[in-house]
Image (cartoon, rainbow, N blue to C red):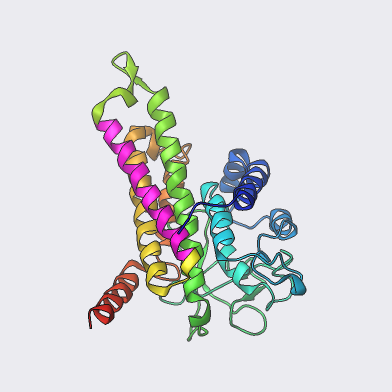
């Protein structure tokens, strides 16, 4: 079985990377960070025109007609650039919420525990809830680019979306994990200590090597789960991707030293986003329980 991306899939990934780097480069990221946590509707609509949200929607319904493997590649690229907003929820809402597929509507979801929802102020709809979004109480967020609100009452049943939501969130985490590898390696080659780059020191080499292994293992798991769409494999992919995103961001901070903790560095943004995504759609505890149940069932 060949899990390598096809030529068309590689072209899709390259095209999305060019779009995101051109439309949401570091300067835009920092401007958004300094200016507030609102969603840029122009960027959202451009993503819609590019087919980001309608990627898996059937061509007969105005979509692109691709599948989960292609969506995983696209969301991995979004994770690399820390693109903000409820990307997964809007993608899942394509074809059911008017305007979601085209990027005209922002759709969020109650995909966090304790009634928490992201980007509620910017949302036109909440996945699974009819009508306008409910009001919520603002909650301080670890990620400065992901505002949180707590909504009272029971949320909608998201079981039909949970597997795909977990997989696409894992793809976002994988993109972040791969990006922090790049940031760590680049800094290790530029920063000098005792007359040589810090990357020449064995301890730093080991950190960077461990980061690469962590990210590639997560990416392999995400790609495999995207092909099989198996619930247990999706749970494993989410578990590995969360660990890679958080662990790599922490190690990247170590490579950067004190610079990594400054506001001017992007490394802490990857860590904060990874913490939040680790609680979305499927937590580590939930993934572990699902995997344990699957193993017990296989052993019978």
Is residue 142 among the parts visible in the rendering? yes
Give 280 or 121, whichever is nearer the viewer.
280
What residue lies at 75% left-to-right and 74% top-to-bottom?
61
Q: Position of residue 10 (x, y in %)?
A: 60, 48
| Res 236 → quadrant | bottom left
Give 28 or 170, whichever is nearer the viewer.
170
Is residue 85 among the parts visible in the rendering? no
What residue lies at 58% left-to-right and 61% top-to-bottom?
71
The answer to whether 112 is drawn above or below residue 209 in the figure is below
Give 3 or 193, whichever is nearer the viewer.
3
Overall secondary structure of the magenta section: helix
Q: Is residue 289 left or right of residue 77?
A: left
Q: Quadrant of the C terminus?
A: bottom left
| Res 255 → quadrant | top left
Does the magenta-highlighted stretch encompass residue 267?
no
Does the magenta-highlighted stretch encompass residue 214?
yes
Q: Quadrant of the N terminus?
A: bottom left
Q: Position of residue 55 (x, y in %)?
A: 66, 64
Q: Is residue 11 left or right of residue 99?
A: left
| Res 280 → quadrant | bottom left
What residue lies at 73% left-to-right and 75% top-to-bottom?
98
Q: How many marks?
A: 0
Q: Position of residue 166 (x, y in %)?
A: 46, 68
Q: Is residue 94 left or right of residue 6?
A: right
Q: Position of residue 174 (x, y in %)?
A: 45, 53
Residue range highlighted in magenta: 203-226
Residue furthest to the top: 195
What residue lies at 44% left-to-right and 30% top-to-bottom?
186
């Amino acid at each position: 079985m060949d899990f390598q991306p096809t030529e068309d899939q590689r072209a899709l990934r390259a095209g999305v990377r060019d779009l995101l780097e051109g439309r949401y480069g570091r300067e835009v990221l920092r401007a958004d960070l300094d200016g507030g946590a609102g969603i840029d509707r122009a960027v959202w609509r451009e993503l819609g025109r590019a087919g980001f949200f309608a990627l898996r929607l059937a061509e007969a319904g105005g979509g692109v007609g691709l599948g989960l493997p292609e969506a995983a590649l696209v969301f991995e690229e979004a994770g690399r650039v820390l693109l903000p907003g409820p990307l997964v929820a809007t993608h899942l809402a394509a074809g059911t919420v008017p305007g979601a597929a085209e990027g005209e509507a922002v759709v969020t979801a109650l995909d966090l525990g304790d009634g928490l929802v992201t980007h509620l102020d910017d949302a036109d709809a909440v996945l699974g809830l009819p009508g306008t979004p409910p009001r919520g109480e603002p909650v301080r967020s670890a990620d400065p680019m992901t505002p949180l609100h707590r909504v009272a009452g029971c949320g909608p049943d998201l079981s039909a979306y949970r597997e795909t939501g977990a997989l696409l969130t894992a793809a976002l985490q994988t993109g972040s994990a791969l990006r922090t590898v790049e940031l760590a390696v680049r800094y290790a080659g530029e920063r000098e200590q005792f007359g040589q780059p810090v990357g020449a020191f064995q301890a730093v080499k080991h950190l960077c090597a461990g980061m690469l292994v962590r990210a590639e293992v997560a990416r392999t798991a995400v790609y495999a789960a995207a092909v099989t769409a198996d619930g247990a494999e999706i749970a494993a992919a989410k578990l590995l991707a969360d660990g890679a995103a958080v662990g790599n961001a922490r190690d990247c901070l170590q490579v950067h030293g004190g610079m990594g903790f400054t506001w001017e560095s992007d490394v802490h943004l990857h860590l904060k986003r990874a913490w939040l995504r680790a609680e979305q759609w499927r937590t580590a505890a939930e993934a572990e329980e699902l995997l344990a149940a699957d193993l017990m069932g296989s052993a019978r």
